[in-house]
């Protein structure tokens, strides 16, 4: 691990002043510290934001649920209002990592975690050093993307939480020295294009302060299901967050793309043909471009969409 | 001249406060083992994947291999050495002995700290990934074998002593 300076931020402004450049914000550290050990991340300064008063979950006047950025995964999953109104989010968080890691990891950090592509961890690639290629495309890619990828990068996004947040149209709030801003999660992760190293739409040095769940997206009839290679404590091969709300259905897939994949095509299909779950799934996945080693994900995603919607429908 | 890559910190471990200087890169695990003589927490994978280094931080189970010592300043750290008060083993520790919840023992300290944290999480009403209904308005999930296996899945045992570990945890829970 490369040497670094460490400081605890006294408040948000203090963190923002110290941030930027070669600095990284440290919260739970479950991904960042691991990547520093691997030499993938080499910050010159760690700004510890874990103890900033950004934790806790509160209800806004408009019925939205505001989740502080340093709320731990554990506290998010256990929160009564999350379990009551957005159960798929609680289930998604509980499906990720282990009890120990969920106690450490935070909501803001979860959104910023890096891919678990084994090539990314082991060697230079387009995500780490632009122009160095994507070894996964011709290599071991059975866990890689089937949707939205390019010849630049075929890595998937690892978060379960973000899949559920995407289905619920969550909004990311951040602060910069120039002021505060918001980004819908649907625009938070830019398309891969030829810039896979650009992973979020956050301005440089921005600090995530909260994630907002719109009240209108609340759906007690929602579910997260994750398929993985062992019963627990593994990343998704394919996962799904699905929610029925007044007059609509929301679907997002995990493990299939560089970001949580909101299934707008399937959702629109179901508005015209309610109940045609298999046809909707097939319409969504007609855009899939599997590699030789991960075609199983197309079948898996189709079956997950169909099965979960059938079980969940009112 | 100040060395910005080192920090002077206070660590509270098992009720005792230690002042020490650390390289900022040092994990809590290495500090406990190499500087403070607490060799209970074990280094298995050093990447948060095996759970052998599990300790309690302010009462919550965490992996000490991904916790930086500087970031743990001010928190109350409990290692396996601090679980038993006055030499009296916890019922959980006694159950591990009674049901033979280990073979080589390398994962045991992590299993014990994890189980203590896990039982507290369950007592607080936290659901798990195998809890059928996560609604807070339903009944509290009963801690059965499936729940224990899921909630303890962050602790690997390469000897495969899982059946005995699950039994020891269930017996502890049943004894209240």
Image: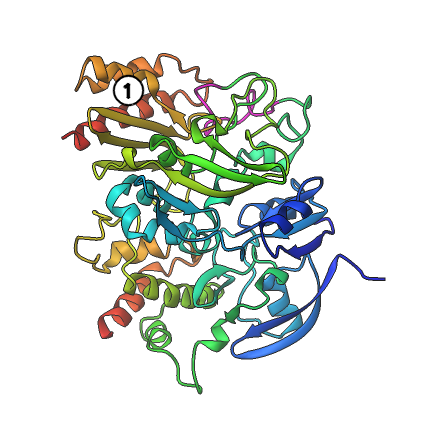
Residue at the spot x=30%, y=63% of the render?
Answer: B124
Classify B18 as above or below A189: below
Q: Which residue is outermost to the bottom?
A: B86
Residue at the spot x=59%, y=54% of the render?
Answer: A11
Q: Which residues are magenta?
A: A134-148
Q: List x then y, in percent, for residue B76.
A: 51, 71
Q: Toward the viewer: B62 or B173?
A: B62
Q: List x then y, in percent, for residue A147.
A: 44, 19
Classify A278 as above or below A250: above
Secondary structure found at label 1: helix
Quadrant of residue B102 in the image? Answer: bottom left
Whether residue A153 is visible here, answered yes or no, is yes
Q: Toward the viewer: A252 or B117?
A: A252
Q: List x then y, in percent, for residue B164.
A: 32, 64
Q: Toward the viewer: A137 or A260?
A: A260
Q: Which residue is outermost to the right?
A: B1
Whether residue A160 is visible here, answered yes or no, is no
Q: Is B85 situated left or right of A122 in this image?
A: left
Q: List x then y, in percent, for residue A305.
A: 27, 25
Q: Given the image, what chain letter belongs to the residue carrying mark 1?
A: A
Q: Which residue is mark 1?
A: A267
Residue at the spot x=62%, y=55% of the render?
Answer: A9
Q: Is residue A139 magenta?
A: yes
Q: Is A237 situated left or right of B173 in this image?
A: right
- Type of colouring: rainbow
Q: Which residue is outermost to the front?
A: A61
Position of the C terminus of chain A, as image quadrant, is top left
Residue at the spot x=60%, y=47% of the render?
Answer: A25
Crowd around label 1: few <14 · some 14–19 · many ≥20 (10 Å) = many
Considering the whole magenta stretch, tell me its main secondary structure.
Answer: loop
Classify B85 as above or below A110: below
Q: Is residue B147 magenta?
A: no
């Amino acid at each position: 691990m490369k040497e670094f300076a460490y400081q605890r931020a006294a408040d948000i402004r203090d963190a923002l002043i110290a941030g930027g450049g070669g600095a990284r914000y440290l919260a739970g550290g479950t991904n960042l510290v691991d990547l520093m050990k691997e030499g993938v991340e080499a910050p010159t300064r760690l700004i510890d934001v874990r103890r900033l008063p950004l934790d806790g979950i509160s209800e806004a006047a408009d019925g939205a649920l505001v989740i502080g950025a340093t709320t731990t995964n554990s506290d998010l999953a256990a929160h009564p209002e999350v379990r009551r109104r957005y159960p798929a989010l609680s289930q998604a968080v509980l499906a990720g990592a282990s009890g120990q890691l969920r106690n450490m990891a935070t909501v803001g950090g979860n959104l910023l975690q890096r891919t678990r592509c084994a090539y990314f961890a082991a060697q230079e690639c387009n995500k780490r050093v632009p122009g160095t290629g994507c070894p996964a495309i011709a290599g071991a890619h059975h866990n890689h993307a089937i949707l939205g990828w390019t010849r630049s990068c075929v890595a998937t996004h690892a978060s379960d939480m973000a899949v559920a947040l995407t289905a619920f149209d969550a909004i990311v709030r951040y602060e910069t020295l120039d002021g505060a801003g918001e980004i819908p999660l649907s625009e938070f992760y830019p398309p891969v294009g030829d810039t896979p190293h650009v992973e979020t739409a956050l301005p440089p040095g921005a600090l995530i302060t909260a994630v907002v769940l719109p009240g209108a997206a609340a759906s007690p009839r929602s579910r997260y299901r994750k398929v993985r290679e062992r019963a627990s404590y593994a990343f998704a091969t394919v996962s799904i967050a699905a929610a029925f709300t007044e007059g609509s259905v929301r679907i997002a897939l995990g493990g299939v793309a560089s970001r949580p994949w909101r299934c707008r095509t399937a959702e629109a299909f179901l508005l015209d043909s309610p109940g045609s779950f298999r046809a909707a799934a097939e319409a969504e996945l007609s855009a899939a471009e599997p590699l030789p080693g991960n075609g199983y994900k197309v079948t898996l995603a189709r079956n997950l969409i169909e099965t979960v919607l059938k079980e969940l429908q009112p | 001249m100040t060395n910005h890559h080192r920090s002077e910190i206070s660590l509270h471990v098992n009720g005792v406060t230690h002042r020490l200087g650390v390289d900022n890169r040092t994990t809590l695990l290495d500090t406990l083992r190499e500087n403070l003589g607490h060799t209970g927490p074990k280094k298995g994978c050093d990447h948060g994947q095996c759970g052998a280094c599990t300790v309690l931080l302010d009462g919550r189970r965490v992996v000490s291999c991904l916790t930086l010592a500087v970031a743990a300043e001010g928190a109350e750290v409990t290692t396996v050495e601090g679980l038993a008060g006055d030499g009296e083993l916890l019922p959980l520790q006694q159950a591990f002995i009674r049901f033979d919840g280990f073979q080589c023992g390398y994962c045991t300290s992590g299993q014990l700290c994890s189980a203590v944290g896990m039982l507290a999480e369950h007592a607080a009403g936290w659901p798990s990934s195998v809890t059928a209904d996560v609604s807070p308005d339903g009944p509290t999930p009963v801690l059965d074998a499936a729940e224990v296996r899921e909630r303890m899945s962050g602790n690997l045992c390469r000897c495969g002593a899982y059946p005995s570990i699950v039994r020891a945890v269930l017996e502890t829970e049943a004894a209240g």
